[in-house]
Image (cartoon, rainbow, N blue to C red):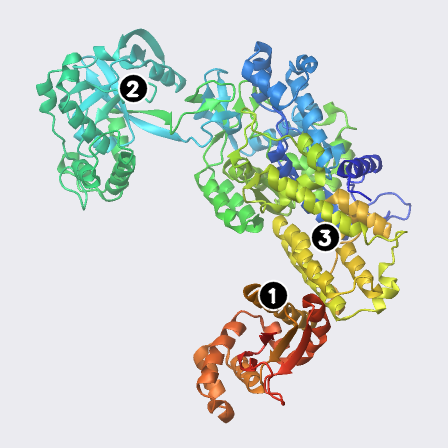
Amino acid sequence: MDYDPQDIEERWRERWAETGRYEADVEVEKPRSSDGEGSAVSQADEEDATFITVPYPYPSGGMHIGHARTYTVPDVYARYRRQQGDNVLFPIGWHVTGTPIIGAVERLKKGEEEQLSVLRDTYEVPEETLQDLETPMGYARYFIEEHYKRGMKSLGLSIDWRREFTTNDDRYSKFITWQYETLRDRDRLEKGLHPVKYCTNEQQPVTTHDLLEGEEAEYQEYTLIRFGLDDTVIPMATLRPETVHGVTNAYVDPEGTYARATVDGEEWIVSEAAAEKLRLQAHDVTVEGTLRGADLVGESVTNPVTGDEVPILPATFVDPDNATGVVMSVPAHSPDDYLALQEAKADDERMERYGVDPTVVDRIEPIPILDVEGYGDVPAKDAVERAGIESSNDPELEDVTQELYNREFHAGRLHDAYGKFAGEVIEDVREAYRDQGVEAGHFGTMYEFSEEVVCRCGGDVEVAEQDTWFLRYNDEDWKAATKRVVENMECVPENTRGEYDHTIDWLNEWPCIRNYGLGTRLPWDDDFVIEPLSDSTIYMAYYTIAPRLREIPVEDLDREFFDALFYGAAAVEDPDPRALDLREEWRYWYPVDYRFSANDLISNHLTFYLFHHAELFDQPQWPAGIVIMGMGLLEGEKMSSSKGHVVLPGEAIERYGADTVRFFLLNSAEPWQDYDWRAGQVESVRNQLERFWNRATELLPEEPSSTVGDDPGAQDLEHIDRWLLSKLQGTIREVTEAMETSETRAASQTAFYGFEEALRWYRRRTDRDRPGAQWTLRHALETRLRLLAPFVPFMTNELHEELTGTPAEDAPWPEVDPELERPTVEVQERQIERLTEDVNDIVDVTGTDPDRIRVYVAADWKRTVFDAVVEAGPDVGAAMSEAMSDPDLRERGEAVNDLVGDLVELVRDLDDETVETLEELDETSVYEAAAPFLEREFDAEVDVYAEDADPPDPGDRADGAVPFRPAIHIE
């Protein structure tokens, strides 16, 4: 029976679909009342319910192999729990909220070549189908049906498809409406000015999921120092307002375009870009005209704090798109500014070209404002000279600058010019000093990003202050409740627990609405849409009721309906019986036992998920566990749909088979680790699975039998059979322990590769035609098929059904059988295996073709030394003392000393059970029993001797024997 994965897998897909194999329903007790009406979910059944979720896909493009791993890892755990006897719910939905799909449609309708290339070339959308994608939901539906669902079904994901929905479904919107009305009533929502990421192209706020670049960008609140030029304000942005006393000059880009604008009734000069940013940040801005940066060069502006006049110099390093486009210079404390000043002094020609008198520049000297230990009066000068930096283009300058900034911030004490702040450390007074400056009218504020941010639509993203509704994640009681969720849930891996706490600590208000897009309208103001990260926090609860909710008219799904559903009959005056009925279903499945998600979502979606569950549900319904997933690479590079650097699951499955794709994705790294899809390695996995198939089919009976254990061969077991069965029990234990902690790589490696090593040795050691060997191999195969069923369900179901009449997924998860565990047999066999390896090593090194092999077992006195080492523990000194307390050993002096060192190393690497077994081991009997095997293995005669036997050693090698490491002589 040849291995044809496509044929096998298609048959099982059809079978699963026809039987609804993975449709999970509530298990209820039989009616309790005498009249036979009514039923209730039993406590025992609730405990057996397992609910697993994964972030629902956003179908703005197709499914690639990275997505395949995201959904296959939880599928493995779902399949494992089913074999453990659990009733498992593993659902999926579709996230269409927001604007990325709308943006993709607009780019398609405009005929943008890059968008068309992605659709045609990467995702293979037929030309005649493109027009069907020209509406948002037409676009979404295509990728849902033709990519995600097709790919998920091809992979064999055990999803309950009855529960799917999209986030713009009418009933789902009613559910989100209930959520946000409840949050508003509980004062978890507030309206006010708030900085948001704002797409200047779409002219609306966006979130991290909407971004093409700058996902990690943070808001930076700059202080604007209001320098003056006559009656005009020329604001200069800084993150270090305390350095205002050290300003010696300013810089502009002479080629840049600047705006003369009325800002909140004042005349300002800022870059054109800054004028727009200020307008977005709630300032009243009217641009009256423009000028070149060169028009400002040579002018002098007034420092609002010191009253000093400082010149404006030309500089190409000034970026007009950053902050206000005018930069103040503090050369005593900024290595960048210090070098820029030295370069300006050395370039008279450039100064004169822009109308600046070089003598004015020559007279500029750094103005120290603070003292910091380890630096002189001008710290910036010391910093660059120590580092040997002479140019502002030196790549090391950034690190040197950051180091000085950190030292000054944490230890720099301000000079007397700072009045009441004199002598204070900057870290302690920066905010107070800034606030004083704002109150005095010297300072203002402005937001800027820490890096460039670009929307998926291609538009620039700026910081805007908008009057918006935001979630009050900064409420201390809400933070405290969310931290309790983290305390009580399982974090996999454990080291991610602190990341949730860290996110909870820094998280502030979160704007939860957008001006337009797909999704649910804000209930009390339908001009706005609830944004994607805010409508995806408790949708897991919706899965539990989605199929039955379709039976209820949309208009009945009001606030009272969901209050009754989630809070019980006492929550409303006249509860809807249908809601109370659905409540039982929700409570049966909830909480979510494990949510599998990406590491980068801890800082937003996953922590929001915890916040909303903490607020809206009671502790028994709080998330029980989160498993973090790593990133996927393709041939060593990050996957990118926009660049066409992806592998589509359909193509991979067609080439290798779904089992191969699954096994590679699961076997190459633990879920939280990054993995790398490499075609050569995937091909290797395909070959390994085919070898497994071929070995397995050799063991299949003519007719399946569900009574493998009753085979007469089970009564005809030899030492080597018992060894393999004992190894099998260890494999069951290791795989189960790994699965319980979601270590899917460790589990699959152990079940497949680890046990394969044992099988290779077993095949060498035994006559496989023996009835006992045949029974042992079939029993091992049946067990391994069940262990591997979550990973490669198609192959294992097919083989297990051929073997037993039952698919592997329908057989219970294997349990360790204590009666088959034989630690002594395993230790004995390990000794034989090591002896075989040692003989092979000698043969390889010497190039000998042995005629006779002599094996020498260590003398009794050496075993006595071993007993002394065991008694004393793995400490050389203590072991020597114990050995030398025996008069007979004391006479052997140096020989005992040498042996103790060797045996201490041996014992140190062994567990207590193995050491106890070795103490009872009769080495001579073990090697004599293995002699026939060794003779076959090496085609030589094998003799076993005791070192202190009489007659004496014929090979004169016996004294090299050590307990459990016999000496060997080859003729």
Q: Residue at x 79, y 46 (%)?
A: 797
Residue 215 at what x, y percent from top left? 47, 30
In the depicted view, which residue is nearer to us: 948 or 25? 948
- For the N terminus, the image quarter is top right
Of tags 1 and 2, the one toward the viewer is: 1
Q: How many angstroms separate mark 1 from mark 2 (CA)? A: 76 Å
Earlier-in-chain disc, 3 versus 1: 3
Corner quadrant of residue 10: top right
Tell me the residue that label 1 is attached to. Answer: 840
Instruction: Tell me if mark 1 has few (under 14), some (14-19) or many (20+) residues whose alpha carbon lies within 10 angstroms of its own.
Output: some
In the drawing, does residue 280 fall left or right of residue 722? left
In the depicted view, which residue is nearer to us: 577 or 331? 331
Instruction: Tell me if mark 2 has few (under 14), some (14-19) or many (20+) residues whose alpha carbon lies within 10 angstroms of its own.
Output: many
What amino acid type is highlighted by mark number 2? Gly
The label shown at residue 787 is 3
Earlier-in-chain disc, 1 versus 2: 2
> In this picture, is 296 found above or below 54?
above
